[in-house]
Image: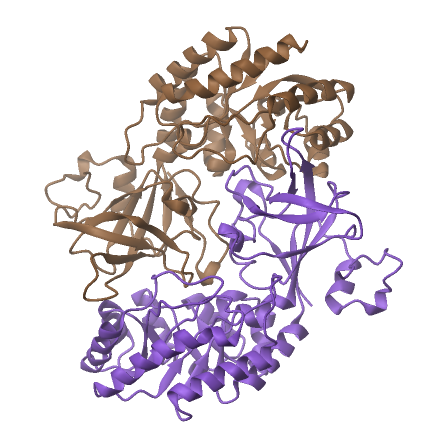
Chain colours: A purple, B brown
Amino acid sequence: MMHFDGAVASTPVATLSRLDNYIAARDFDRPTLVMDLDRVADQYKALKSGLGRAAIHYAVKANPARQIIARLVDLGCHFDAASKAEIALCLQEGARPCDISFGNTIKRASDIAWAHSEGITLFAADAHEELEKIAAHAPGASVYIRLIVEVSMADWPLSRKFGCDRDMAITLLSYAKELGLNPVGMSFHVGSQTRQADMWIPTLDAMAAIWHAAQDAGHTLSMLDIGGGFPAFYGEAIDAPAAYASKVMELVTARFGDTVHIMAEPGRGMVAEAGVIVAEVMLVSRKSDRDMHRWVYLDIGRFSGLAETEGEAIRYQFETARDDDAMGPCVMAGPSCDSADVLYEKRPVQLPMTLKAGDRVLIRNTGAYTSTYSSVCFNGFPPLAVEVI
Amino acid sequence: MMHFDGAVASTPVATLSRLDNYIAARDFDRPTLVMDLDRVADQYKALKSGLGRAAIHYAVKANPARQIIARLVDLGCHFDAASKAEIALCLQEGARPCDISFGNTIKRASDIAWAHSEGITLFAADAHEELEKIAAHAPGASVYIRLIVEVSMADWPLSRKFGCDRDMAITLLSYAKELGLNPVGMSFHVGSQTRQADMWIPTLDAMAAIWHAAQDAGHTLSMLDIGGGFPAFYGEAIDAPAAYASKVMELVTARFGDTVHIMAEPGRGMVAEAGVIVAEVMLVSRKSDRDMHRWVYLDIGRFSGLAETEGEAIRYQFETARDDDAMGPCVMAGPSCDSADVLYEKRPVQLPMTLKAGDRVLIRNTGAYTSTYSSVCFNGFPPLAVEVI
């Protein structure tokens, strides 16, 4: 386990990472996410080396820090935007409209019109009404149809919220043409946090069957958006990014050929490991003398950045300066008066028996889906602070 | 069902409520919570008439809109604060320090010191370490011990996050004295959204047993904080506020006598029914020709104000201008690219078959626990707007 505290004599500061050195040298008066831009750049390069001919559209929603977008623009990355505000951000940071996809299948009509006026030409859809909005407000635009593929092996499979079934997709490709749109292809999502590349196989098999059925029905498809699912390390083994991406592309090419344009949308897989949240213990307690576990309350919880602990789905890694002491199981919770603001209870977390209020806690690999989930001022607590280095 | 749209000829505008008239006359370019201050004042008066000798400490976290705090100060209301920021807000709006309790059992040491310096004298605790923090940073303060009482009949029972068991509470009362604090009493929470006053009985019985055990152990107790749990209307029958509060006080007095100082902390029960969220349909779709239900996507979801739909716990009431048309079941979801952003799926919602993108939807009784849960900019969507009339 790494140390982060310069005061621990056995770990010279010189061996610490850039992030750890930055954090060790500073006090933080509230929970703060520190992002290392160089780590983001390295991860982009690793994914790009593996994905090869595919275009990487960074899923801006994972972390829309302005500096991250700017660095990715410099590196030649493309972007997948969920909203007008995300498109505006990318444009402000220098992205070209032709490199931005409007990937949310649920768009406000006026936002479609605005995106069209800004030069965005590629839109996702999974329903008749969405195609009608796009045809009305972005006439002639290119569209791709999102599919539901329910064979995920991901740690966090998606709900049925996005996509449509095979027959509906083929109907929508035809309907798009009727509306004067340019239906170029399909998209899917393998599920969040798909830890090994082999786990893509059932989904790719199912998608390939749909793809070829659409072609058999007379549709010319030139683009496949393979979505996200690229993992981050949360305690369970994952493949290294270049090898993972390379294997995924091998699986894709075997099923869809080598001439189809491939888009990939890593979000978590691009930025999660580049971020550390600096938090603080507020209280350590037992509810009863007979309690097996301590309760550890942090100054950050589900409503101030750690929303992905819902259902204990994402298991973050915690570090303290006391990790050489004896460890014991803890229930972990946030600081708010909300009884649902509990992080880990079903599977308790091992933390030092000596832990106490005021101790610093580092939460590793928290660069994705933390800062923007944070509530505006729930219980009077400020949103998660962000520092980019 | 009430109409809100002045264009519906059969419902003259003159019969609409102040909230409905305000909303019908305006366009909103994003999801907006509209709060009626007079409704809050009426609810305060109704609860106060029922609670009689009890002091009402409004749970600021339910809705910290500045105008609400100011109006409640004028009415003589007291306040329960979850954080430094909530205390600061109450003080700025004219509340006296002696009328503010710092009711979060999880407090940052420096916030305790700040509150003490501002004149706050009443603090909650449920653990040794919390008492030590209070003794160190607010020496001599009055404290009350929060109990876990696990016999709730509430719609939304609380987790074990807050409170301690009977033996621990008695130990903590003694420990508080040792630390030079003034242990004045106990608190509990009957569970959120306790729809009828009779549902308080099992919890009050359990609390009374603990209370008398503490007295038998030699502790002089002068204050009982009965917490919140006061309900709002979400589709299932609830008692009217004055009758509900009066019945609760009758149950309390029968068990704790008529000389103990009683604090009550309504939050939801004070403000929920004074608010309406104005939202818009983004998309209506079917995933397949074989789908039983439509999917209805709104421009507001779990991460932009409707967090309490988690687990479909709180069932909000929806109204549209098409409610005279034939109705049918819908799955409802928010606008974000997050697959967890689904509002109601297990128990679908009845909505007009004619509903379509662009239609306005009113979400009734949303004045509590909406605006502050809203994320800062998840997926690039702005936080829930708030207008107070």
Q: Is residue A381 above or below residue B156?
A: below
Quarter of the image with the N terminus of chain B is: top left
Name which residue lies at 54% across and 49% down. A302
Residue B268 lies, in percent from the top left, at 42, 33
> Extreme top residue here?
B258
Residue B251 lies, in percent from the top left, at 43, 12
Total marks in image = 0
| Residue A44 appears in the rendering | no
Quarter of the image with the C terminus of chain B is: top left
Residue A122 lies, in percent from the top left, at 36, 79
Name which residue lies at 47% across and 21% down. B203
Residue B49, picture quadrant: top left
Name which residue lies at 75% across and 69% down. A18
Q: Nearer the viewer, residue B46 or A189?
A: A189
Give left or right: position of A86 versus B247.
right
Give left or right: position of A251 versus A270.
left
